[in-house]
Amino acid sequence: MRYVSTRGHAPALAFDQALLAGLARDGGLYMPAAWPRLTAPEWKALAGRPYAEVAVRIMQPYVGRALREDDLAAMIADAYRGFTHPAVAPLKQIGANDWLLELFHGPTLAFKDYALQLVGRLFDHVLKARGQRVTIIGATSGDTGSAAIEACRDRAAIDIFILHPKGRVSEVQRRQMTTVRSPNVYNIAVDGTFDDCQDLVKAMFNDAAFRGELNLSAVNSINWARIAAQIVYYATAALALGAPARRVAFAVPTGNFGNVLAGYAASRMGLPVAGLVVGSNRNDILARLLASGEMRRQAVEPSLSPSMDIQISSNFERLLFELFGRDGARTAKTLDGFRQRGAFKLTAAQHKRLGRDFVGARANDEETVATIARIHRRTGELVDPHTAVGLNAAALRRGDPRVPMIALACAHPAKFPDAVERATGIRPALPPALADLLTRPERLTALPNDLAAVEDFVRGRVRVAA
Ligand SMILES: *Cc1c(COP(=O)(O)O)cnc(C)c1O
C-alpha cells in the first residue's frame, strides 16, 4: 500500500514512512492510494473473532509489505493485552435498538488509547529497525497528553516531553500524566495557557537546528496509523450486530474528525454503514457545514466536552480530498482559501454526496447535561459529556428504527466527574486500576513560558541525540 498526500505534491510513501512522517512535506495528510475492500464472506468470517485478530485482518492491507505480518500481529496482541475488558471494545444495549460502544477500557480511559497503544509500538519497532530514535514533543489541555505518554512510556527508541499549562488541567488529567514513572517520560508544567504551550511546541518544530538535532516527532491525530487502528472497533461492533447482512449506524462525538473518519474508512472497506452521525458541542462548525454546505470558522468557546473544543478539524481535509475526487491541487486551493477567508462553500453536488454518509447535530452545555441525566434515568448508565454529545445527536438524527444505532462512548465518566455529578447527583468513581491515582507521587518540572528554557530542558534529557 502506498500513501498519497491530500495536497497532491509530496511523494507517495510506504506505511512505515508515512507513519514516521506524520504530516506530508506539502502540508497535506497521507491517505491510502486505494481503499482495501473485504468481501461479504470475508467480513462474515471475522464475526465473533477476538478483537486482536480482527485488528490484524483490517490493518494488514494498510501496512502492506512495510512490516512482517507476524510482527504486526505481535504488536497488536501486546497493545490490547492490558485493556481491562476481555472484549476490548464491548457493546452495551441501552434501548430497543440502541447501543453504547465502550471505548474507555484502555490505560487512560478514553478512546485515544485504542489507536495510540498500537501506534507507540509501531513507532518503536520501525525506529529500531532503522537504528533511529525520536523525541516526541506535544502540548495538551488534558486528554491527549496522557494517552500519548502511556503509548510511548518505556519504549527504547522514544523520549517523550509533554507540556501542559500549569494549574489549568484537571487534577485527574494532570495525575494521569505526572504519576507515570517511566524514565523516558517528562512532564513540563508551563507558566502560561494551553495556547502558550502550543506556541512553544510549534516554535521547537520551527527551530530547524533543534528539530534536526533531536529528531522531533509527534503522534498527533493526523497520523494515518491512528485512523487505521480506529477502524477496528467500528468493524467489531457492526459484526456483533449482524453485519455484513445488516446495516448499522454510528453516532460519534467529534472534534478533530479522526474518530468519525475511521467510520467512513470502515464503510469504504465494505462494511454496511447506514450513516455516521457527527455530534458537535457549541463549537459546531461541522454541524453547520453538514446542514448548509458552508464551512465557516468561528472563535473557539470552552465547553463541558473540552476534547471537542476545536474549530478547525484537521482530519476533515481527508474527507474533502475524497469529496473532490482525490484532486490534491483542488484540496490545497480550497484549504488555502479557507485559511485566508475563514470560509468556503461546497457545490450542491458535493454537499449532497457528503450527506449520503454524514449527518450532524450540536448540543450546548445544557443539552449535554440533560442528555447525561436522561440516559441515567432511562438506563442507569453514567456517560461522560463527550459521549452525551454523541447520544444527543443520535437521538435527534435517528433514522430507520430497524437499523441499530451505535453511540461511541469515548471517555469513562470518571474523567469528567463534575459534569456527571451536576447531571445526576452521582460522582462516578475511577476504575480499580486507577483508584489510588490521587495518592501516587507526581513527577513534573515547572518551567517559565520561555522557548530557550524549554529547549535547554529537553536537550539535557534526551538519551541520545540523533
Ligand atoms: C479526542 C476526543 C474526542 C474527539 O475525537 P476526534 O477524533 O478529535 O474527533 C471526543 N471525545 C473524547 C473523550 C476525546 O478524547
Image (spheres, rainbow, N blue to C red):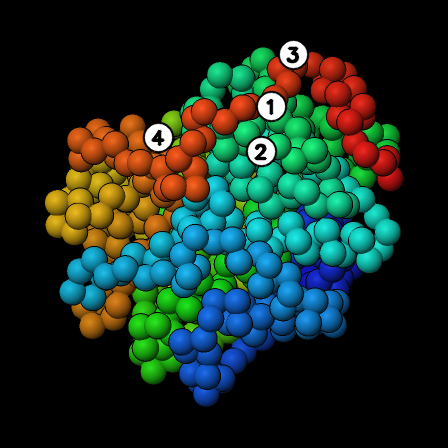
Labelled pair 1, 2 in contact (Cβ < 8 Å): yes
Looking at the rendered image, the disc whose residue lies closer to the viewer, 3 or 1, is: 1
Q: Which residue occupies 46% across, 83% down?
A: 45
C-alpha span from label 1 to label 4: 29 Å
Residue under label 1: 443
Residue under label 3: 448
Q: Is residue 107 left or right of residue 337?
A: left
Give, as a three-letter code, the residue at label 1: Arg
Looking at the rendered image, the disc whose residue lies closer to the viewer, 1 or 4, is: 1
Which mark is first along the chain, 3 or 2? 2
Of 61 and 203, which appears nearest the observer?
61
Q: Say how many tags the image has.
A: 4
Q: Quadrant of the N terminus?
A: bottom right
Of 312 and 96, which appears nearest the observer?
96
C-alpha span from label 3 to label 4: 27 Å
Looking at the rendered image, the disc whose residue lies closer to the viewer, 4 or 2, is: 2
C-alpha span from label 1 to label 2: 8 Å
Residue under label 2: 180
Give, as a three-letter code, the residue at label 3: Pro
Which element is circle 1 on? loop
Give, as a three-letter code, the residue at label 2: Val
Give, as a three-letter code, the residue at label 4: Ser
Q: Mark 1 packing: few (<14 Cα in 10 Å), some, or many (20+)? A: some
Which element is circle 3 on? strand
- x and y, in percent, of residue 415 in the image: 38, 36
C-alpha span from label 2 to label 3: 23 Å
Q: Is residue 231 above or below residue 109?
A: below
Residue 328 appears in view: no
Of 358 and 262, which appears nearest the observer?
262
Residue under label 4: 303
